[in-house]
């Protein structure tokens, strides 16, 4: 059976882009393959953050992932920092990934322009992401389109390590959904919807109430034309709404567009589709949030299952790269 791995940062409110670009796929994959999903809290340390808020965000993200449909009895769901193996393998991969490769990561260029403190970890975090993936002998990585370059780097790092030190890692492939692969900010439809961009009018959080969702979609930036057409380059705002509708209704943006002759009608139906899609998730999230003790217990079980897989890969990598066995 193929193994699937993916991760998500507890860096802010989980949003519609995360759901359509990644989580819908995660839920489907857990029933088809052996699935391992990780809340990558170490990645969230690459930015300035508040420690108490990070702890709360990690707990609440775990509950939201279960509310969306991840079943800890079916998949392995755990928190990255609960296993030291991720940080250990990240160091080995930093030693086999070049400065030039990391410098070419567009997310680093973009994020380092946005902050006054650029941590060394922000630069090297693709090596930690590669470690996350490679530790689980992953075959498939379901992600949004924004992660395409990082998965390529992971493949290159795995191949180089295997060539230099002998067969160690499975070389994974990415899996990107047809609709919803890159949900754009509703106010700035040429930038992706993102947790770190905040909870403004351009981002639909999975906890937004129906009124807030409708307001944000009805006010979404479109263009000065009137034709409803899927054309992401010329009409990014309208195309984004069509992508969202298509992902919510399991259709294609082109066929959704055929049903509309005005932006107003498209926005109204899009808001209704999103509200209907989020209602059961929000209800379940409310129930799960009431029992943090049970969430912590499920995460500890997940960490044990993950450690069993990760420790074997790490031992193999340490052996092959030439580190002396410390077991005696
Ligand atoms: N806008 C998006 N459209 C489709 N998929 C998306 N993903 C993220 N944004 C979109 C996918 O969600 C998964 C988790 O990614 P993340 O934790 O990096 O989410 P984020 O919202 O992107 O978070 P940040 O803190 O703002 O981080 P950056 O700016 O680094 O992305 C991934 O599979 C991602 O593809």
Image (cartoon, rainbow, N blue to C red):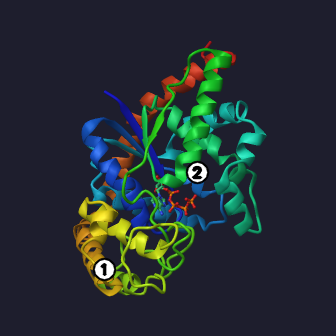
Residue at (54% x, 47% y) in the render: 148
Q: Is residue 37 visible?
A: yes
Residue at the image point whose x is 63% and y is 32% from the top: 157
User: Which residue is disc 2 drawn over?
Assistant: 42
Q: Is residue 152 above or below residue 292?
A: above
Q: Residue at x 42, y 70 (%)?
A: 239
Please tell me whether mark 1 sits on a helix, a strand or a loop.
helix
Q: Is residue 123 left or right of residue 35?
A: right
In the rendered structure, are the residues bearing label 1 and label 2 in contact, judged by CB atoms less than 8 Å apart? Answer: no
Which quarter of the rendered picture does the C terminus lie within?
top right
Q: Is residue 163 above or below residue 14?
A: above
Residue that appears at 42% across and 87% down: 219
Q: Pick the quarter of the image with the N terminus.
A: top left
What percent of the width, then of the height, locates residue 102?
71, 44
Spot occupied by residue 191 in the image (x, y as percentages of width and height): 56, 69
User: What is the quadrant of residue 245 in the picture?
Assistant: bottom left
**Image: 95 above or below 104:** above
Q: Residue 283's image quarter?
A: bottom left
Q: Which residue lies furthest to the top in this view?
A: 328
Q: Is residue 68 above or below residue 155?
A: below
Label 1 to label 2: alpha-carbon separation: 40 Å
Tag 1 residue: 266
Q: Can residue 74 be seen in this view?
A: no
Disc nearer the start of the sequence (1/2): 2
Disc 1 vs disc 2: which is toward the camera? 1
Asked whether 321 or 54 is in front, the reply is 321
Q: Dot 1 surroundings within 10 Å: few (below 14), some, or many (20 or more)?
A: many
What is the x, y in percent for residue 20? 37, 60
* Residue 212 appears left or right of 203: left
Q: Is mark 2 on a helix, strand or loop?
A: helix
């Amino acid at each position: 059976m193929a193994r699937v791995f993916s991760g998500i940062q507890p860096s802010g409110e989980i949003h519609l882009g995360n759901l359509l670009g990644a989580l819908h796929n995660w839920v489907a994959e857990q029933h088809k393959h052996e699935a391992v999903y990780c809340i990558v809290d170490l990645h969230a340390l690459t930015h300035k953050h508040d420690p108490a808020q990070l702890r709360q965000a990690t707990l609440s993200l775990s509950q939201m992932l279960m509310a969306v449909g991840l079943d800890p009895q079916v998949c392995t769901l755990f928190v990255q920092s609960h296993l030291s193996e991720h940080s250990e393998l990240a160091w080995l991969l930093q030693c086999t990934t070049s400065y030039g490769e990391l410098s070419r990561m567009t997310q680093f260029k973009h994020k380092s322009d946005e902050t006054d403190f650029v941590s060394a970890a922000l630069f090297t975090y693709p090596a930690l992401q590669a470690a996350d993936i490679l530790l689980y002998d992953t075959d498939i990585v379901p992600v949004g389109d924004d992660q395409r370059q990082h998965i390529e780097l992971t493949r290159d790092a795995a191949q180089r390590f295997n060539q230099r030190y002998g067969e160690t890692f499975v070389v994974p492939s990415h899996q990107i959904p047809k609709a919803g692969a890159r949900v754009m900010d509703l106010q700035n439809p040429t930038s992706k919807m993102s947790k770190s961009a905040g909870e403004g009018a351009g981002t639909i959080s999975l906890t937004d109430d129906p009124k807030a969702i409708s307001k944000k979609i009805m006010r979404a930036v479109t263009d000065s034309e009137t034709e409803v057409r899927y054309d992401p380059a010329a009409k990014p705002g309208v195309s984004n709404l069509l992508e969202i509708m298509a992902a919510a209704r399991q259709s294609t943006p082109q066929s959704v567009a055929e049903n509309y002759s005005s932006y107003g009608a498209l926005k109204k139906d899009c808001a209704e589709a999103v509200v209907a899609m989020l209602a059961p998730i929000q209800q379940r999230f409310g129930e799960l949030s009431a029992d943090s003790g049970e969430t912590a217990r499920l995460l500890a079980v997940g960490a044990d299952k993950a450690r069993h897989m990760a420790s074997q890969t790490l031992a193999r990598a340490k052996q092959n790269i030439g580190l002396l066995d410390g077991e005696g």
